[in-house]
Each structure stands twice: as structure tokens, then as C-alpha cells.
Image (cartoon, helix red, strand yellow):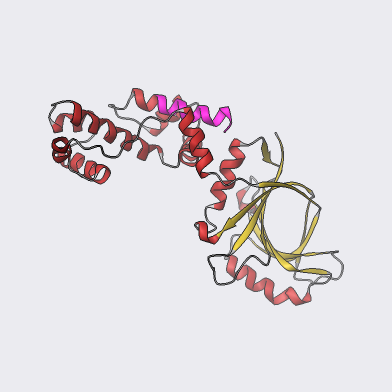
């Protein structure tokens, strides 16, 4: 994890701890972390695995549980101290977190759920536990021929491609590619479904062509059995934030070869490629 993103999270945690018994706003935490609110929320969630709001609630309920065990203060006083408007709302949240209502928790003296303040070591452990690490490979230039959709349905895009696939000339069969291009002007975001060809000569008039420059790529192999493909983007974003590489240009590629199984079978897997360069 780079010092920059680690610093954002640790500064936010420090601010939260100092204001745990006060009203806390996202804008104030982001300012203390030297980060814009939108980017702070995204960075915090991807690195910590929890939203700032959930983290604050869990910290407050942890400290409230500690006070219930170690003091004889009234439950309502503790509830108000940690930002709850009534004992009823506190009891509901406390029971969801600790599996017991506050009064019974105090009598039994049991240890419930605990969310201790995040530390630098905690963040390192989270990274080791959750991050899907890629392989770094060098690939040659890739020539693609296929169909393009500007914000349409991906399934329909592949249906259109299948109708022209047999007309594509000089094809290298067996591998399908899904190219996502997302320039800063998001209105130009588009997706291309296609296959690799040796050359662009004599291609169907309704087809599109695209050259993917050769270079370094981070390759993330994602298995359906490990939670589906939706989590792959989070893995890639998290790795990019923490690695010594940055994205070379705003695009990513999905590769569908013999490992990809129709019907979303659990052993199905695909590769996600990101073009990268050293920072």
C-alpha cells in the first residue's frame, strides 16, 4: 500500500477517534484526510472494506459496549454520548451488532463484536487478506475486429457480433475480447466485442477495427466461483492505488478463452487486462 492512500485512511481514523462522541460529517473527515469527499469515500471503502459511516457506527458500538461492562452509567446516557437519539434506537443497533440488548449484555459480561481503531498494521493485514494480485506480462500489439456499443446492453452487443463473426477475415479463432474504453469525457465511453485478426484487409463493412498497443499489462484472473466477475473492478482499482504502476491509458480488456464456460458455470474464469507503466 502506498504511503499516500495509507495516510488518507490513517488521518481519517485519527479524526474519527477524536470526535467519536460528536456529530461527524463526511466532508469534515475528508478535509482532515486531505482528500475530496467523493474520492475519500471510495478510497476508504476499497482499502478498509467498509464505508466510513459503517466504520463509525461499529466503533461507537464497540466503545459503548466497553462502557457498559466497565461502568455503571445509565444506558440512555451512554446511548446519547455515542450519537443515538433514543435508547430504543441504541438498543436496536446494539443488538444487531452484539447479538444481545444492552441490559442483558451488561449483566452477562460477555465479549461481543469489537471494532478497534484501525492501525497501520491492520491495513497491511487487510491488503494481504483481500487483494487479488495480478501477473505482470508483456504482450504484442493486438488487432481487433468486431462491434461497438456506446452505453448499450453488452449481451446485445455480443449477439450482434455473433452475426458478423463468420464474415471476419484473417481471424485467429478461439479467443474473444471485450474492450472497455473510458476516456475522461465519459460521454464517449464505449465497449467493443471482437476477435483478433492478423490484418485488417477485407473486413465486413459493418465491423469496427481497433489496435491495442503492445506493452506491459496487469492480468487479473477472476473465477466465477470466487464471487462472480463484478468484484474484479474493485480488485483492479485497489491494486492500481497501491502498486508501483499506473494505468497507461483509459481502457481495460476482458479475455474469453477455453476457460470461459457458457451458462456461468462455477469453474468458469476470464482474464482482465489493464495496460500499465511504471509510475
Relative to 233, say whether 164 is above or below.
below
The quarter of the image holding the N terminus is: top right
Please provide percent x and percent y for residue 97.
Answer: 27, 43
Please provide percent x and percent y for residue 37.
Answer: 46, 34
Relative to 275, say whether 107 is above or below.
above
Which residue is located at x 59 percent, y 41 percent?
239
Q: Nearer the viewer, residue 121 or 41?
A: 121
The quarter of the image holding the C terminus is: top right
Q: In this view, does 183 lie to the left or right of 141?
A: left
Instruction: Check if residue 259 falls in the magenta segment.
Output: no
Query: Which residues, given as a range, are shown in magenta?
Result: 1-14
Please provide percent x and percent y for residue 143.
Answer: 80, 59
Which residue is located at x 18 percent, y 41 percent?
91
Relative to 3, say whether 43 is above or below.
below
Could you say which quadrant of the image residue 19 lies in? Answer: top left
Which residue is located at x 32 percent, y 37 percent?
58
Q: Is the magenta stretch mostly helix, strand or loop?
A: helix
Q: Is residue 32 left or right of residue 134?
A: left
Q: In this view, does 18 lie to the left or right of 127?
A: left
Which residue is located at x 35 percent, y 25 percent?
17
Could you say which quadrant of the image residue 216 lies in? Answer: top right
Amino acid at each position: 500500500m502506498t504511503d499516500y492512500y495509507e495516510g488518507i485512511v490513517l488521518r481519517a481514523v485519527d479524526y474519527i477517534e477524536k470526535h467519536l462522541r460528536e456529530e461527524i460529517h463526511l466532508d469534515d473527515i475528508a478535509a482532515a484526510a486531505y482528500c475530496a469527499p467523493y474520492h475519500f469515500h471510495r478510497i476508504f471503502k476499497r482499502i478498509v472494506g467498509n464505508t466510513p459511516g459503517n466504520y463509525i457506527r461499529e466503533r461507537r458500538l464497540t466503545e459503548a459496549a466497553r462502557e457498559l461492562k466497565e461502568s455503571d452509567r445509565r444506558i440512555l446516557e451512554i446511548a446519547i454520548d455515542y450519537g443515538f437519539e433514543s435508547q430504543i434506537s441504541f438498543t436496536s443497533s446494539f443488538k444487531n451488532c452484539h447479538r444481545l440488548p444492552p441490559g442483558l449484555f451488561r449483566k452477562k459480561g460477555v465479549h461481543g463484536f469489537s471494532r478497534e481503531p484501525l492501525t497501520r498494521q491492520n491495513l497491511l493485514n487487510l491488503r494481504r487478506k483481500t487483494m487479488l494480485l495480478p501477473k505482470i506480462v508483456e504482450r504484442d500489439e493486438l488487432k481487433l475486429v468486431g462491434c461497438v456499443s456506446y452505453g448499450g446492453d453488452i449481451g446485445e452487443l455480443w449477439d450482434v457480433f455473433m452475426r458478423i463473426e463468420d464474415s471476419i477475415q484473417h481471424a485467429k479463432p478461439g479467443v474473444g475480447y471485450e474492450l472497455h474504453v473510458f476516456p475522461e469525457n465519459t460521454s464517449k465511453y464505449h465497449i467493443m466485442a471482437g476477435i483478433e485478426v492478423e490484418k485488417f484487409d477485407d473486413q465486413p463493412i459493418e465491423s469496427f477495427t481497433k489496435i491495442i498497443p503492445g506493452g506491459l499489462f496487469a492480468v487479473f484472473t477472476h473465477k466465477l466461483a470466487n464471487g462472480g466477475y463484478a468484484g474484479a473492478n474493485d480488485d483492479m482499482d485497489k491494486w492500481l492505488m497501491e502498486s508501483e504502476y499506473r494505468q497507461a491509458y483509459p481502457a481495460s480488456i476482458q479475455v474469453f478463452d477455453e476457460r470461459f464456460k457458457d451458462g456461468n458455470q462455477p469453474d468458469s474464469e476470464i482474464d482482465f487486462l489493464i495496460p500499465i507503466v511504471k509510475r
